[in-house]
């Protein structure tokens, strides 16, 4: 059958608007809308038969029941709903009444065409409303990861649901004081509620003093709410590239992190202003630097990218250590592969296994007979406190084992967290 014969058969099945007549031919002649295809076919048939040209308004169409005349109205509604939300990319999705889809298939079957011929109603509707939304708002469609998603429910007139995808800020933080956890740590006694049951009813939790948190401050607590406010969002979530112990500082180059903001109404705050606000509020407890607007992929990047760590430690020995023996022990550990059975202090829910990690570089000096400072660059996952103490023989080799004295880390700082094979910061992960 020719295109014209197919079109005649379609029209014979009942009144069709131009879009519904053109849709079964959507894979022909790129550059036309289905509306234009339908009008051209109707015109050609009228000329061939020398009959009066008569169009069918969508309201009389038995397939779409008027929906193909509503693109503009739905686009207006979407633009209204998006008022006050800043976005650069969007996507439109449509919930189509089952009857419309069923009729669309039935139409092709009655005309003797393939039931899947051309295009589905849903994809046409998404595109036609979508391009009008783009024109009205001056933004671009993005099928992968739009800033906002508008869901149209054709079963309920004017029902538009807006989903705002999260926005992300990358940076590095330093923790200049000890005993600050990276993330907020809910109180284990009250589960974060700050309340407990007293003899006469609910009272402030005694353990945390009613705050709900074990620590008053955290890196997350300084960073996430300010990023959330800068982006006018609902919630801020902090993702760190690993974490240091609560009693360890994070100095020098700092540790990569991403702050995620859910349902942001602004996506491009000034990162310089934000950086200054966070650093002012933290008043020297923590610092952030190098803030940049990032893509959602940056979350996985900071969480999954293999990173080596550089530490600085104060070490105390149980008895006098000979300077030559100390140097020899460092020589032994430099470049060594360390066997570590899961340390006692580590989360007991974690399976106990022996794993191996490399010491890339180690240097140090004795500050007196029984004290030393050590700087160490090692593979991610190396337990450095145990590398020093030996952990009762569970870590091998160790500084304590090589020197045959007890040794303990009395202060620990992380000074760098850097990608093993390439830096965390790759341009593809940034939006600015
Ligand atoms: Zn129609
Ligand atoms: Zn509590």
Image: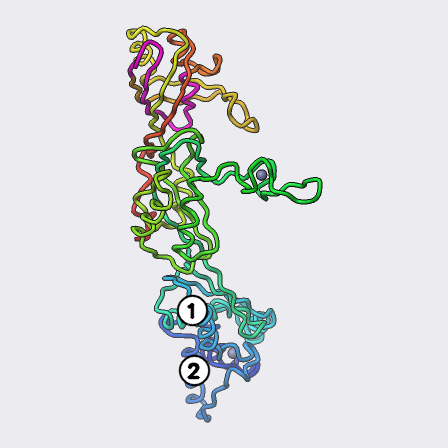
Q: Earlier in the sequence, mark 1 or mark 2?
A: 2
Say if 187 sits above or below 354 in the image: below
Disc 1 crowd rating (10 Å Cα; few below 14, some 14-19, many 20+) is few
Residue 392 drawn in magenta: no
C-alpha gap between disc 1 and disc 2: 35 Å
Numbered disc in front, either 1 or 2: 1
Say if 252 sits above or below 18 in the image: above
Q: To which residue does mark 1 refer?
A: 83
Return the residue found at the far right.
199
Judge from the rendering whether residue 31 lies leftward or rightward of residue 202; answer left or right: left
Name the quadrant containing residue 223.
Answer: top left
Mark yes or no: residue 6 visible. no
Q: To which residue does mark 2 refer?
A: 39
Q: Where in the figure is residue 327, as x and y percent of width and height?
A: 29, 11
Point out the stretch of residues depicted in magenta. 365-388
Q: Residue 402 or 50: which is nearer the viewer?
A: 402
Q: Where in the figure is residue 130, as x and y percent of width and height?
A: 42, 69
Residue 182 image label: none
Q: Secondary structure at mark 2?
A: helix
């Amino acid at each position: 059958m020719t295109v014209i014969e197919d079109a005649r058969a379609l029209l014979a099945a009942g009144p069709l608007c131009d879009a519904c007549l053109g849709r079964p031919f959507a894979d022909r002649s790129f550059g036309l809308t289905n509306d234009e295809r339908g009008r051209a076919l109707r015109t050609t048939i009228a000329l061939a038969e020398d009959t009066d040209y008569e169009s069918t308004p969508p309201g009389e169409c038995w397939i779409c029941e008027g929906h193909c005349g509503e693109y503009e109205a739905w686009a207006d509604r979407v633009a209204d709903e998006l008022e006050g939300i800043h976005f650069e990319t969007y996507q439109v999705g449509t919930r189509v009444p089952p009857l419309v889809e069923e009729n669309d298939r039935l139409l092709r079957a009655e005309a003797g065409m393939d039931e899947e011929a051309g295009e589905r109603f849903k994809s046409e509707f998404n595109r036609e409303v979508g391009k009008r939304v783009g024109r009205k708002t001056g933004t671009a469609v993005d099928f992968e990861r739009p800033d906002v998603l508008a869901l149209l429910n054709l079963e309920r007139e004017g029902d538009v649901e807006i989903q705002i995808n999260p926005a992300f800020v990358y940076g590095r933080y330093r923790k200049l004081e000890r005993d600050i956890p990276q993330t907020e740590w809910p109180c284990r006694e009250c589960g974060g509620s700050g309340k407990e049951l007293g003899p006469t009813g609910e009272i402030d939790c005694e353990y945390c003093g009613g705050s709900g948190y074990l620590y008053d401050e955290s890196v997350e607590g300084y960073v996430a709410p300010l990023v959330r406010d800068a982006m006018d969002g609902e919630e801020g979530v902090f993702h760190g590239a690993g974490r240091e112990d609560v009693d360890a500082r994070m100095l020098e180059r700092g540790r990569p992190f991403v702050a995620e903001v859910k349902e942001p109404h602004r996506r491009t705050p000034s990162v310089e202003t934000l950086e200054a606000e966070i650093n002012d509020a933290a008043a020297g407890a923590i610092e952030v630097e190098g803030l940049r607007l990032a893509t959602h992929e940056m979350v996985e990047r900071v969480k999954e990218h293999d990173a080596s760590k550089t530490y600085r430690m104060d070490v105390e020995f149980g008895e006098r250590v000979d300077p030559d023996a100390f140097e020899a022990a460092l020589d032994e550990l430099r470049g060594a592969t360390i066997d570590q059975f899961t340390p006692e202090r580590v989360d007991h829910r974690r399976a106990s296994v022996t794993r191996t990690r490399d010491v890339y570089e180690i240097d140090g000096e004795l500050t007196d007979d029984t004290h030393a400072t050590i700087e160490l660059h090692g593979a991610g996952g190396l337990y450095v406190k145990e590398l020093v103490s030996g952990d009762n023989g569970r870590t091998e080799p160790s500084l304590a084992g090589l020197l045959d004295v007890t040794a303990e880390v009395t202060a620990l700082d992380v000074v760098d967290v850097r990608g093993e094979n390439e830096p965390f910061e790759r341009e593809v992960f940034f939006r600015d």
